[in-house]
Image (spheres, rainbow, N blue to C red):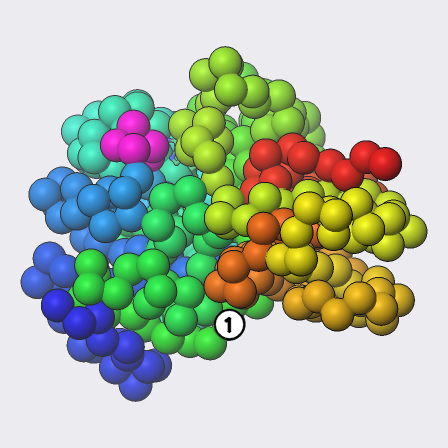
């Protein structure tokens, strides 16, 4: 099967594929998702197979609005969840709540009593869900363990021949996946940082905890997906925390290999004289978040041994970037 690329005039065709039980990758404001009928366990299984994803890792249920959520989620959570939906939907916030028993299959929930819901801020995909008339599951549309796809060509690279179609809406605007907040616990807890920040959530919810930085290999993480190897290109990624250290890091790794790629802001790239492949992260941590996964993929295509990637100081808006970069580097930071 050759995977077909569809554009925004062909949403009906994409909805038709979904209705026939086929897999269709869809655009969102964060990353591309791998879509399938969330109400059919047999089809949801195909999503895990196409990605090579462990089956205990639950999927996000994508909806076209709050109304669709309340067919599945526990209605006791409505007052609290609707405060979040009013403020952040459509947008990069995924909300975990207990479900009404029996409404979603274990293939979707990973066997948990909760499920994750999200209304993406992308008109093409909102129309797709509306036309299809049912929610669609959507993990990121990459091979499990690889950087998430921010362009249709990334999806094609990983999944060509394994899915029916890719609905192409150009490069995604945010570039890192949605913030995941768990409402099913006593104090709402952030399981994955994203562009909706901790401070944004505190404004609406009051007390909020962050669990994502505590997850180690041994612990059982609250978001099952956080325990697996993630965002990892074939090259070893090394994080350069201080801009001033790029030159000495290049000197160090040059002793070992000439296959070194640089992933940094224009300001840093302009100061590097060595003729190594470079990929621009733009001007700040927001543009860096947008371009991180594309950069990792691009430099990997050039078969680098090392990717030296710029770290950013801890701020409210750097949490998502730092979280993804740390995972892709397996926490390896440059030391002199
Ligand atoms: O931006 C996004 O969220 C993208 C786009 C496509 O919407 N989707 C995405 O899906 O990143 P995925 O499957 O790659 O990540 C979903 C994360 C995983 O870490 C998963 O373990 C967690 O959410 N998750 C899903 N359901 C959960 C649940 N019931 N309890 C705890 N964690 C859950
Ligand atoms: Mg993913």
Is 258 left or right of 91, judged from the image as shown? Answer: right
Residue drawn at (44%, 48%) of the image: 146
Residue under numbered circle 1: 171
Magenta stretch? Answer: 54-58
| Residue 123 x, y percent position in the rendering | 42, 72
Above or below, 101 against 160 in this view is: above
Please, what secondary structure does the residue beneath circle 1 have?
loop
| Residue 161 x, y percent position in the rendering | 19, 64
Predominant SS of the magenta segment: loop
Above or below, 214 against 116 in this view is: above
What residue occupies the far bottom of the structure in this picture? 9
Residue drawn at (50%, 14%) of the image: 219
* 93 or 10, nearer to the observer: 10
What residue occupies the far top of the structure in this picture? 218
| Residue 233 x, y percent position in the rendering | 50, 49
Is the shortest distance between ligand 1 and the CB of mark 1 under 8 Å?
no
Q: Quadrant of the C terminus?
A: top right
Is 279 left or right of 293, judged from the image as shown? Answer: right
């Amino acid at each position: 099967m050759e995977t077909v690329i569809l554009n925004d005039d062909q949403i009906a065709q994409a909805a038709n594929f979904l209705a026939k039980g086929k897999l269709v990758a869809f655009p969102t404001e964060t990353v591309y998702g791998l879509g399938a009928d969330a109400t059919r366990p047999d089809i949801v299984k195909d999503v895990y197979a196409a990605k090579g994803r462990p089956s205990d890792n639950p999927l996000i249920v994508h909806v076209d609005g709050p109304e669709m959520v309340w067919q599945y989620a526990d209605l006791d959570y409505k007052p609290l969840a609707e405060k979040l939906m009013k403020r952040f939907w459509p947008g990069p916030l995924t909300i975990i709540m207990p479900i009404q028993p029996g409404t979603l299959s274990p293939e979707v929930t990973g066997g948990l009593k909760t499920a994750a819901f999200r209304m993406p801020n992308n008109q093409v995909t909102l129309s797709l869900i509306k036309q299809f008339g049912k929610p669609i599951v959507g993990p990121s549309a990459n091979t499990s363990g690889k950087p998430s796809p921010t362009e249709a060509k990334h999806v094609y690279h990983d999944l060509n021949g394994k899915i029916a179609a890719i609905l192409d809406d150009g490069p995604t605007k945010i570039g890192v996946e949605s913030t995941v907040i768990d409402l099913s616990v006593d104090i709402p807890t952030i399981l994955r940082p994203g562009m909706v920040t901790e401070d944004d959530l505190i404004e609406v919810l009051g007390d909020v905890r962050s669990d994502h930085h505590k997850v180690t290999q041994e612990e059982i993480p609250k978001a099952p997906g956080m325990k697996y190897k993630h965002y990892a290109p074939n090259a070893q990624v090394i994080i350069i925390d201080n801009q001033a250290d790029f030159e000495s890091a290049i000197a160090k790794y040059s002793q070992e290999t000439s296959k070194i790629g640089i992933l940094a802001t224009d300001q840093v790239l302009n100061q590097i004289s060595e003729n190594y492949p470079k990929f621009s992260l733009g001007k700040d941590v927001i543009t860096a978040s947008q371009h991180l996964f594309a950069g990792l993929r691009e430099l990997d295509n050039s078969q680098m041994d090392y990717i030296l990637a710029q770290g950013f100081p801890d701020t409210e808006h750097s949490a998502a970037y730092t979280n993804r970069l740390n995972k892709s580097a397996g926490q390896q930071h440059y030391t002199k």
